[in-house]
Each structure stands twice: as C-alpha cells, then as structure tokens.
Amino acid sequence: AQTVTQSQPEMSVQEAETVTLSCTYDTSESNYYLFWYKQPPSRQMILVIRQEAYKQQNATENRFSVNFQKAAKSFSLKISDSQLGDTAMYFCAFMKHATSGTYKYIFGTGTRLKVLA
Amino acid sequence: GAVVSQHPSRVICKSGTSVKIECRSLDFQATTMFWYRQFPKKSLMLMATSNEGSKATYEQGVEKDKFLINHASLTLSTLTVTSAHPEDSSFYICSARDRGSGALNQPQHFGDGTRLSIL
C-alpha cells in the first residue's frame, strides 16, 4: 500500500527567508503524480504545485519549487522569499490509480508552517 | 478557475438528526467527486469516491449506511450523515475532478468544507 510521510509536524521561518518542507512516499508503481496542497486557516485546500513522476525536471511555480528524487522517493517543497500569507498547513499528496477506475489521493499528515514577521 | 461550492459551511444539530451536505461544481462538469473527513490538526482521509449515475465506492472502514452519497448529476454530489452522533462531528471536505480536463490524473478542486458539530 502506498504511504506518504511528512516528518516535520511544525516549522517556522522568518519572512523573506527560504524554507524546505520534506515529504517521502512509498510505492511500487513507476508512474504516478505528486502534489503539494496548502490549507490556510480558512480551511480551503489550494493546489501549490504538482509533479509527474515520469518528468525528471523539477516543477516550479513562482516562489515554490520542488526537489523530486524518484529513486529516493522524496518530494520536498521549497518556498523562497516566504510571505506572511504562506502561513498554512501544507499537505503532500500522492495520486494513485484506484481499482474503481479513477485516481485518488493519499495525503501525508501535514506540516504546519508559520511565517514570522 | 474551477470552483467547487460546498454547503452548508457549518452545521450544528442534535444527536439523532440526519444532515445533508451538498457539493457543487459551478463551472465544470464532474463525473467523479470525492468526500473527505478531516479531524482537528490531522490529514484528510478519503471516505468515498462518488461517481455520477452509479454507486459510490467507499473506503475500507467507512459505513456506507451511515454516510449516504448521491451523485445524481454532473454538477452535484450530496453526503448525508444519517442519525448523526457526537463522534460524527468533524470537518468534511468534498472535491471534484473536471470531466473536461482530459486525463483522469488531473488535480482535484476542493470545496471550502463543512464543519459538522453534533450535540
């Protein structure tokens, strides 16, 4: 069974600094998809970035980038120039093909990030 | 962008009451919607996958008679918590995948969630 592990329950970073959130996963599949979602205090889940496992190039979205190490099954998120609005819970998610024919997410336990002024 | 509306955002009711939560895709069609449950400071746990026009697929350990799911149209799925008890109190979140987005592996779009409190 696939599992997703986020080993850092809480982290903090000074405004304008850089922070890296870790995520590891376990799977026997060769093709899959990975995502980082942000859940601010408003509780809405917001897609931050995604990565296809077959792509070697790391995904980037403005201040957000990932370090995808397929062999190590690692998918960390780097936030550059941290802003107060980045304060949120961050979830790493693995998308797998389900027996029902669709794709479903397996979420990690989350990392609570606090950006300090 | 794709918008998913979830209603109500908060509900408080007495034990034994049945509660219905709606999940609507506002600007796209969704053949598949997902229902999650989230405990305080915990991750999202998938409860069931809702398929338009067919029965929902429930995850192991989720009582299908307790959590009734109906997906009667391409834009609406409902979750009914039947005879709710205090242990059913939680944050429930729905998500939907855009049918027109092509591949089945496209990201899900999430609703704002429903906080259910059973007294």
Image (cartoon, coloured by chain):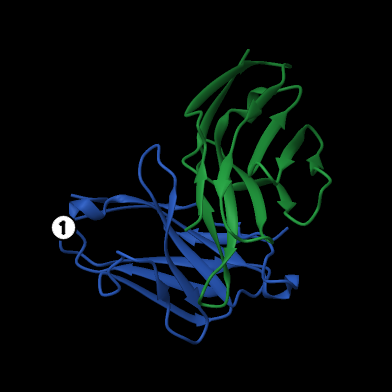
Chain colours: A green, B blue
Q: Residue furthest bottom?
A: B53
B96 displayed left or right of B16: right
Secondary element at tag 1: loop
Characterize the local packing of mark 1: few (<14), some (14-19) or many (20 or more) Cα atoms within 10 angstroms: some
Say if residue B93 shows up in the picture. yes
Amino acid type, residue under disc 1 in the picture: Ser
Mark count: 1
Identify the image quadrant of the C terminus of chain A. top right
Q: Which of A68 and B63 is in front in this view?
A: A68
Q: Indicate left or right for B47 with B6 as reference.
A: left
Subunit bearing disc 1: B
Q: Nearer the viewer, residue B109 or A105?
A: A105
Is the residue A91 above or below the residue A80 in the image?
below
User: Residue B5 location in percent, x, y?
Assistant: 55, 61
Identify the image quadrant of residue B82.
Answer: bottom left
- The residue shown at (73%, 38%) is A66
- Residue B79 picture location, percent across and down: 38, 69
Q: Nearer the viewer, residue A26 or A98?
A: A26
- Reading the image, the residue beneath label 1 is B15
Residue A36 in the image: x percent, y percent? Answer: 63, 44
> Is residue A45 among the parts visible in the rendering?
no
Tell me which residue sits at (68%, 68%) in the image.
B27
Q: Position of residue B3 (x, y in %)?
A: 64, 60
Q: Is residue A75 left or right of residue A24?
A: right
Q: Tell me if residue A17 comes above or below residue B58 in the rendering.
A: above
What residue sits 47% from the left and 70% below the top?
Answer: B49
Q: Quadrant of residue B7?
A: bottom left
When the figure is inspected, residue B36 is found, relative to residue A74, above or below; the finding is below
